[in-house]
Image: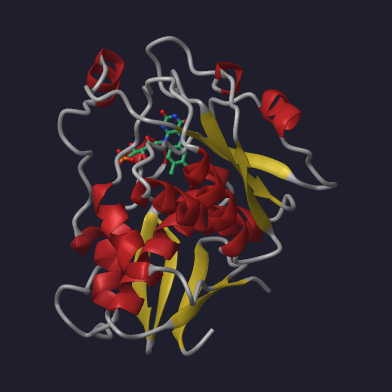
Amino acid sequence: MTVLSLADAPFDRWLEAARDRRSRRSFDGTPLPAEALTALAEAAERWRPAEATRIVLIEQASEALFKGIVGGYGRITGAPSALAMIGASEGADAQVATGYAGEAVILEATALGIGTCWVGGMFDSAAVARHVELGAGERVLAISPLGTPLEKVSTTERLVYGMKKPKPRKPVAEIAPGAEAGGWPSWARPGVEAARIAPSAHNRQPWRFRADGGEVVVAFDGPEARIVSKRLDCGIAMLHFELAVRKAGASGTWQVLSHRSDVARFTLGSA
Ligand SMILES: Cc1cc2nc3c(=O)[nH]c(=O)nc-3n(C[C@H](O)[C@H](O)[C@H](O)COP(=O)(O)O)c2cc1C
């Protein structure tokens, strides 16, 4: 059973970062300062929530890591460094845990002023494996560039990603039916608001929250539970949820579930 919780996470700092964060894909190529790299490596080690995952800093990344076609989804340029988001097994728990753990480091990077972008499909696993030694059963589930974004939103970012405006998000009524009408625990509503702004592959936002007694369950938006990126997406949203619950003065833990469409259950109590 995988239980996820980051009791000592700097929730104020990361919530602020969550509001500022936007995926960035064009960087200026300059190396990141040594202190920033050290801080990120430490963050990845310190906030490792479960054995099922680990996040590794690649200090010197090459463009070969990113396979995106020119002008297409996943086209990343000029990133001096990267993160490898590694699942320790093929299991569904590892995928959820990797979303959760990876987002912690993404938010810390954002707080340090570093640009990021989850990349779940268009990367070269063999190229990543040349930078990171993988253990038996370990798999790279996603990577992220790290770098100083070009000051200006690039043409690709503007044309392909519509980056002039922030990406739209589904309303609370859709991702957490009933939360607006009341009947939900008071601490859960800010959690849903923070989950809402989480990044997801193709901005699909596949997470659906429901109150279940005094607890909250996150499930997929449909019966398909096998898509890896949806599990990553839910893990990411779960971290956002937990940060806001902590800011609201409550605390609790996520238990990852093995049900086909229910992903995890949040229960109040200390970690
Ligand atoms: C698990 C995951 C995989 C993603 N994969 C890619 C990718 O392969 N290429 C890419 O350009 N963006 C990728 N993204 C970024 C999303 O497109 C982006 O988060 C979403 O459109 C919302 O925009 P925002 O991050 O600016 O809020 C991915 C995001 C997540 C969470």
Image coloring type: secondary structure
Q: Residue furthest top?
A: 70
Is 112 on the left or on the right of 19, as rendered? right
Q: In the displayed structure, would residue 261 be above or below residue 251?
A: above
Residue at (59, 23) in percent of width and height:
65
Residue 223 shows in this picture: no
Q: Position of residue 144 (x, y in %)?
A: 50, 36
Marker count (numbered): 0
Q: Nearer the viewer, residue 183 or 19?
A: 19
Q: Indicate the quadrant where residue 215 lies.
A: bottom left
Classify the position of the C terminus by image quarter: bottom right
Q: Position of residue 93 (x, y in %)?
A: 64, 61
Q: In the displayed structure, would residue 20 be above or below residue 79?
A: below
Classify the position of the N terminus by image quarter: bottom right
Q: Indicate the quadrant where residue 73 lies.
A: top left
Residue at (71, 63) in percent of width and height:
51
Q: Position of residue 184 (x, y in %)?
A: 26, 82
Residue at (43, 63) in percent of width and height:
239
Q: In the displayed structure, would residue 265 be above or below residue 135?
A: below
Q: Position of residue 246 (x, y in %)?
A: 35, 78
Residue 50 shows in this picture: yes
Is 27 on the left or on the right of 160, as rendered? right
Is 84 on the left or on the right of 33, as rendered? right
Q: Quadrant of ligand 1?
A: top left
Residue at (22, 22) in percent of width and height:
152
